[in-house]
Amino acid sequence: MTYRENCTLPAEFLQGLCEHGLDALPQAITLLLNAAMQAEREKYLGAAPYERSPERRDHANGYKEKTITSRVGALQVSVPQVRNGDFYPSSLEKGLRSERALKLAVAEMYVQGVSTRRVAAVVEKLCGTEISSSMVSRATAELDGVLESWRNRSLGCFPYVYLDARYESVRQNGKVEDAAVLIAIGVDESGKRQVLGVSVALGEHEVHWREFLTSLQQRGLSGVRLIISDNHAGLKAARRAVFGGVPWQRCQFHLQQNAQAYVTKHEMKAVVAQDIRAIFAASDRDEADRLMKRTVEKYQQTMPKLATWMEASLPEGLTVFSFPERHRRLLRTTNGVERVNKEIKRRTRVAGLFPNEASCLRLVSAILMEISEDWQTGKCYLTFDP
């Protein structure tokens, strides 16, 4: 059944879905995809079928049959066409991009000889067909072009920038090593978030961070008023070199965790955590400084290493007091980036081990591109004054 034959879900079909369960799932997904693509074409055209409207920008031009591979099998969908433009339904492409990247990442392991019986089973489950090296090469070239264009797009003014790093296992010269995945997320002047960039590399941390931050600057990143991050290795020196005049907010959540390493008595951990929370929850910077001084004095005798660490490190988490109060809750920590990292981990766990840096970058880029597009169509993250 194509969309042209039936663009609605008839009662007999719904009854059949109930009776046949998962056997009818491919047909249901096909109908839903066709309906979504048809609605997107109408929005693109600016007019419903046969409607006369001054807002019309193009005309419908039939359908093109396309077979796509999904986790429920091959689906035969009808892709709407237009007469003059280059319309292609994002409801089809966007939903498949990350899954296609995941298939390629796993397939590369299979092709390059680093696979196991378990990986082969994953390939078969995800793709449904045997994957040849030529298929991987063709699909990789097509996907890499799209992702590279997104990673190199021009940026603009982003007052707030979050930086974070995570690690993925990559095979290098016969050994398994941890590759750093650097991520930058910005909040633009309209209050919406975007993923600004991503980089994957093995090697020295400071060099990697400096190259990554420089690339953001070269792509037009400007108007940065605050950088929020944890104290990652190499980041401080790179940040000072590239964005030397921009204030830095160290993640308060990670500061809380770091403090526990200096607490010598287990029963004092909760007390120390409560004291630090009180500093971060102060009404203004003066009050925070007063509480911090009192807390440092409190532990000067019983836990001198903790007191020394507090005096040196906690001020790095108080920069947020110089910014609007309504923004502080979202600027205090990198928790928003951590949620993105959890989604990346959930998706990359299937691959387990990447055969090279390019394979890792491909999958992570596809995931982040999808997340960033969702943010742009969603609610504002925070609100700036007019």
Image (cartoon, rainbow, N blue to C red):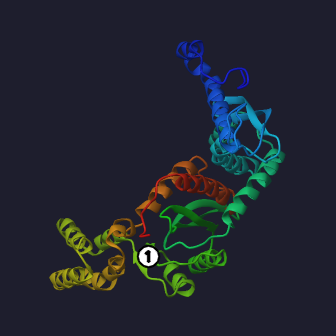
Vertical position of residue 383 compared to residue 113: above or below:
below
The location of residue 382, given as percent across then percent down, is 42, 63
Left or right: residue 65 versus residue 347 is: right
Q: Quadrant of residue 385?
A: bottom left
Residue placed at 64% from the left, 36% from the top?
A: 39
Describe residue 249's horizontal placement relative to residue 305 as left or right: right
Does residue 93 lie above or below 207 as drawn? above
Mark 1 lies on a secondary structure that is loop
Badge 1 amino acid: Asn
- Indicate whether 324 appears above or below 68: below
Image quadrant occupied by the C terminus:
bottom left
| Residue 150, image x, y percentages | 68, 61
Residue 332 to residue 211: above or below:
above
* Residue 179 in view (yes/no): no
Name the image quarter holding residue 339. bottom left
Q: 335 or 51: which is nearer to us?
A: 51
- Tell me the residue that label 1 is attached to: 231
Q: Position of residue 329 (x, y in %)?
A: 34, 66
Residue 189 pos. (x, y %): 50, 69
Q: Is residue 34 visible?
A: yes
